[in-house]
Image: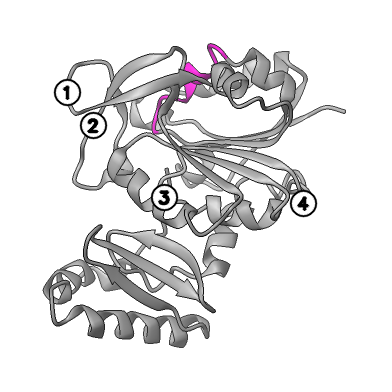
Amino acid sequence: MRVIKLFGDKFSFMPIFISILDRKGLRLFLCFLFGMISKIKYGIFIKISYDFQDKLWAHFTNGKLIYVDYKPNWNANYSVLQNLVNDLGFQYFSPPVEGGLIIDIGAANGTETIVYSNIVGERGKVYAIEAHPKTFKALKKLSSHYSNINPVQCAITDFSGKVYITSEVNSYHNTVVNIKSGIEITTISIDEFIESNKIDKINLMKINIEGSEEKIFNTIDKALSLTDCFAISCHDFLFNSGNVIRGKIIKKLKDHNFQIFENKTGNIVKDSWIFAKINS
């Protein structure tokens, strides 16, 4: 999962500032303030509205919903979202063509999903998969404005059944656990998901699921035969496991005739990603 970083280190006071204004009678001012900050920073005014029932902040540009979250965000404009996606493999392989199909596993609140939707166009389709119910709520609200996004709440792993997901204060950092704690969620393997949705071609599969990515590759043979490109975040850095997860996934991809690309930036998070393209 990934979300847009709200503020840099220079604005460490902002969460407190938001908490002060995030209440009845002051939210309208907060919406206008963040819209103006976006205008000054990016030259684009973001219209922000608050949904009292769902407690979600919706961000619009030129009348189009582009971002939904539990806090307002002045960085929530399309150029920022597009830059996030461009860093996820498009420096190594071309984006899918219009009419293509993308599976976004670990879609969070849709920061990449919204750009994928624009890439494949109305004739294409994006399956946006998110496990945590709170995060999925934001994703579902965003997806309701786009006919080519199909939001799915489940965890992709190596079996069909039930698992539990943690319930952290920051819901975007939750991960699947084996013990009966947290929130019970439905699971399915990626191959079963493909079969149940009658998918016969995948132009891009993005996987970012906080350490559970290795399990997906235990039952991925059908998906490997249908997918052109992968973008996968390997979370070895969360477990001090060296590059065990990364190594297993790279081997699996190479065994199925994929060319591997890796970042060498020195940033632990950016370098956790591996990218793969099927050899033609």
Report, in whole angstroms, how far the alpha carbon at label 3 lies from the one at label 1: 24 Å
Q: Are marks 2 and 1 in contact (CB under 8 Å)?
A: yes
Mark 2 residue type: Thr
* Residue at numbered disc 3: 139
Q: Which residues are magenta?
A: 210-219
Which of discs 2 and 3 lies nearer the camera? The answer is 3
Report, in whole angstroms, how far the alpha carbon at label 2 lies from the one at label 4: 37 Å
* Residue at numbered disc 4: 98
Residue at 48%, 53% (x, y): give it: 143
Q: Earlier in the sequence, mark 2 or mark 3?
A: 3
Kindly tell me whether residue 114 is visible in this rendering: yes
Classify residue 201 by image quadrant.
top right
Q: Earlier in the sequence, mark 2 or mark 1?
A: 2
* Residue at numbered disc 2: 166
Which of discs 1 and 4 lies nearer the camera? The answer is 4
Q: Earlier in the sequence, mark 1 or mark 4?
A: 4
* Residue 259 is a magenta residue: no
